[in-house]
Amino acid sequence: MKQIVINGGKTLSGTINISGAKNSAVAIIPAAVLCDEQTTIYNVPNISDRDALIDILHLLNCETSLNADLLKIDSSKLENKKIPLELSKKMRASYYFMGALLSRFKHVEMYFPGGCNIGKRPIDIHIKGFEALGAKVKIKGDFFTIDAEELKGTNITLDFASVGATINIMLAAVKAQGKTVIRNAAREAEIVNIATFLNNMGAKISGAGTSVIRIEGVDYLHRAMIEVIPDRIEAGTYIILGAMIGDNLKIDNIITEHIDALLSKLKEMNVKFIADDTSVTISKCDNIKATNLKTAVYPGFVTDLGQPMSVLLTQANGVSMFEETIWENRMGHVKYLNKMGANIKNGNTNSITIGPTPLSGCEVEATDLRGGAAMVLAGLIADGTTTITSIEHILRGYDSIITKLKNVGADIKIEEIKEN
Ligand code: EPZ
């Protein structure tokens, strides 16, 4: 068992290069099995979710080669196998194999996916999409069997603009007969990245990035390549950090447009930064204004930055109100921020923060991926030493977080927890 140890209060300067987006890569890797030949994926982040997905590819008889951030996948000898419980549960994104294998084999056997405990996380919208395309879904406890004699294009209006359901239905529909139209589709940048990958293979998808996606089914998907877009959540996490302890901290290799909502909010809070199309340079702000913040689907303020942002709110002057609208359970980290000295009152999906409050290092836990990132930010701005346990959550989604932070001046390390 490992923990992160941080000696806080150091000023950070230099450059942090942002890796490929977790939430894009974790869909692009399963999407590769739709290809009847080989695919090449650039800018794949080094995160544990990547490795768990590659384990599933190997189970399905794909050959892979990974060299730094370059992943090659040969799915020409793909075999359909039941994805066992331990692989299905390792992460949320295992469910993209439902859409992809349904498309290739018309038969899928796997378990309900895992992932962060941030809400109930049902997959009913995915299932309704598969059924609309002609599949039959049997659920026994946590085990899913999905079968189709054939998949036929149809019109599907999603109950909610779900990121996962939009991608999964897109995967299932690319080889369906005829035309599928997904209405009320999610518009996240990651969806455009995945659609581009599929189109590079010969799929006929238009409208990705808007709320109406049109897919004309094709029979064969050929060799293709794709570059994973920069991770807007990783970028946002470090930008928020820069507003608290940066000294010309440059967050580089980003698509700035993807984080417009964050940058608008920071401006409103009096935080100063210099932004161009691919980077943001930011320094500590001494007079941060309190704000009201509500998460929303893209292009609104992204839920995945709510927890990192809650650390900034502890340093803002006055009362900040925060409302989480996507997940029911994203406040687990608040008790640890309060333990460090914050003044936050919270319900399940909202909080009131009175600031500014100095934070002091202590023992805390990473309750989930972004809650864990919030603990890292809190530890870096706090006086004294913070130790964070359950760090596997953080390593699922932040590429080389220790090295990247050390390189800009943080005193942070991972160490083995000593057993008594
Ligand atoms: C993706 O989750 C991301 N995960 C999440 O990031 C992110 O928070 C979320 O999109 C929203 O942006 C991955 O890409 C792997 P949704 P996803 O389907 O696809 C409800 C992180 O920190 N819903 O858009 O699972 C659901 O319960 C992670 O990186 C249904 O009710 O999110 C939620 O309230 C955490 N039925 C809302 O929709 C369904 O069938 C949004 O979920 C599907 C979803």
Image (tube, rainbow, N blue to C red):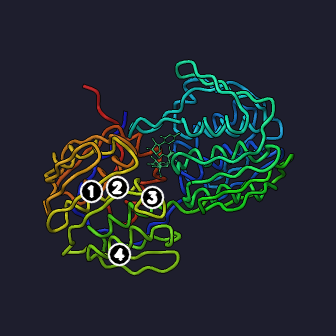
Contact check, label 1 and label 2, Cβ < 8 Å: yes
Mark 1 or mark 4: name the one nearer the start of the chain.
4
Which residue carries the number 3 mark? Answer: 233
Mark 1 or mark 3: name the one nearer the start of the chain.
3
Q: Quadrant of residue 117?
A: top left
Q: Work out whether residue 159 or residue 283 is closer to the camera in this orientation and state it.
A: 159
Which residue carries the number 1 mark? Answer: 322
* Mark 2 Cα shell of 10 Å, populated few (<14), some (14-19), many (≥20): many
Which residue carries the number 2 mark? Answer: 306
Q: Amino acid at mark 4?
A: Ile
Give the alpha-carbon distance from disc 1 to disc 4, as whole Å: 23 Å
Q: Amino acid at mark 2?
A: Gly
Identify the residue at horizontal 33%, vertical 47% (top origin): 371
Identify the residue at horizontal 20%, vertical 43% (top origin): 335
Q: Which mark is residue 211?
A: none
Contact check, label 1 and label 4, Cβ < 8 Å: no
Q: Amino acid at mark 3?
A: Ile
